[in-house]
Amino acid sequence: MLEIEKLEQEIKEKLPKRMYFCYAQDTFLLFEVTRLVRKNFDPVVIETYESPEELDITSFASPSLFSSKTVLLIYNFEKIKKTEKRIEWLKKITSQVHSSISLILLCNASYKEISDEIAYLKKDKNSLLYNLDLKKEDLPTWIAYKASQNGITLKQDAIYYLIDITGGQPGLISSEIEKISLLTDKSHIGLFDIKDILTELGEFTAFDLIDAIKKKDKERAYRLIDKLQNTEPDMILGALNWYYTNRVNADPSVYNLLYRTNLSLRQARSCSLEMLLYELLKN
């Protein structure tokens, strides 16, 4: 079971523990926690804090007069810079907060950066820890989970296609799943269903660009890259990677081109995709 699913079970059980410590290097996965909390709790009982420093611990040492449960969502635990100060803060929290209060601490950091804090919380019987970062092998399971939350089931070919065209980025994958769920009445979605949905949108997609490249239609390819300027570059590169991976006798140098373009785009070079097209179409 995924860590996010374990946390969701706790949320559905109304957070019986006092402390839920969630950490990830991908901020999107942390905001998924917020979505689940807001989905399962009345907004009246949720308090949100941008950092631990904003929280007045003493004011939460007694139960609320207005509800039987209060949920504190606290972002950016990593803003407390020193490990010693973080552990000191955790000690105050775990010793003073009333049992009717549940804290969800969100930390944008890796295990290595907060290993001492994690070791401390593991000793506390009222705390649970969740590493929300996804391993590569867990990504298909997570995609199936996200799809089920949107009321659809994705077939294996659709799951691996989404991984390819997004570069495996959870935020982009989630956005595509939401789009697909809104644009189809089908409950079981395969690769060709996704392509049909994109076609029905009446918009140019990365598939149109691939078609132009296959046909060596340079003029159309350059027109399309201009029309796709509002599309995430990762989606375009992911679709190209998918095409060449599934193409028989693809030139291995293509992958080096895609990699170099990706690096160049990270440095905000706006003409990188045009240069990639030039290389792909020059033979």
Image (cartoon, helix red, strand yellow):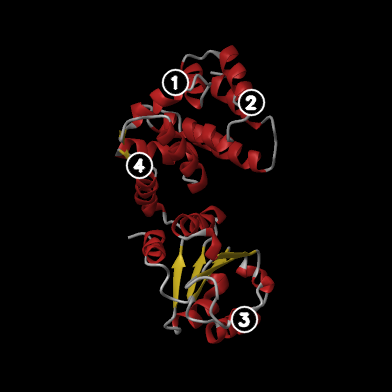
Q: Observer-nearest residue: 249 or 22?
A: 22
Q: Earlier in the sequence, mark 4 or mark 1?
A: 4
Q: Amino acid at mark 3?
A: Trp
Q: Residues within 10 Å of mark 2 (few under 14, many from 20)?
A: some
Residue identifier under label 4: 151
Q: CA separation, marks 4 and 1?
A: 20 Å
Element marked by disc 1: helix
Q: Earlier in the sequence, mark 3 or mark 4?
A: 3
Residue identifier under label 2: 274
Residue identifier under label 1: 200
Q: Observer-nearest residue: 59 or 180?
A: 59
Q: Residues within 10 Å of mark 3 (few under 14, many from 20)?
A: some
Q: Residue at horizontal 40%, vertical 61%?
A: 8
Q: Do labels 3 and 4 touch, CB within 8 Å?
A: no
Image location (x, y in percent) of residue 177? 43, 39
Q: Observer-nearest residue: 132 or 276?
A: 132
Element marked by disc 4: loop
Residue identifier under label 3: 89
Q: Observer-nearest residue: 158 or 225?
A: 158
Of the two numbered discs 3 and 2 in the rendering, the one whose residue sits closer to the viewer: 3
Q: Amino acid at mark 1?
A: Glu
Of the two numbered discs 1 and 2 in the rendering, the one whose residue sits closer to the viewer: 1
Image location (x, y in percent) of residue 184? 38, 29
Q: Amino acid at mark 4?
A: Gly
Element marked by disc 2: helix
Of the two numbered discs 2 and 4 in the rendering, the one whose residue sits closer to the viewer: 4
Q: CA separation, marks 3 and 2?
A: 51 Å
Q: CA separation, marks 2 and 4?
A: 38 Å
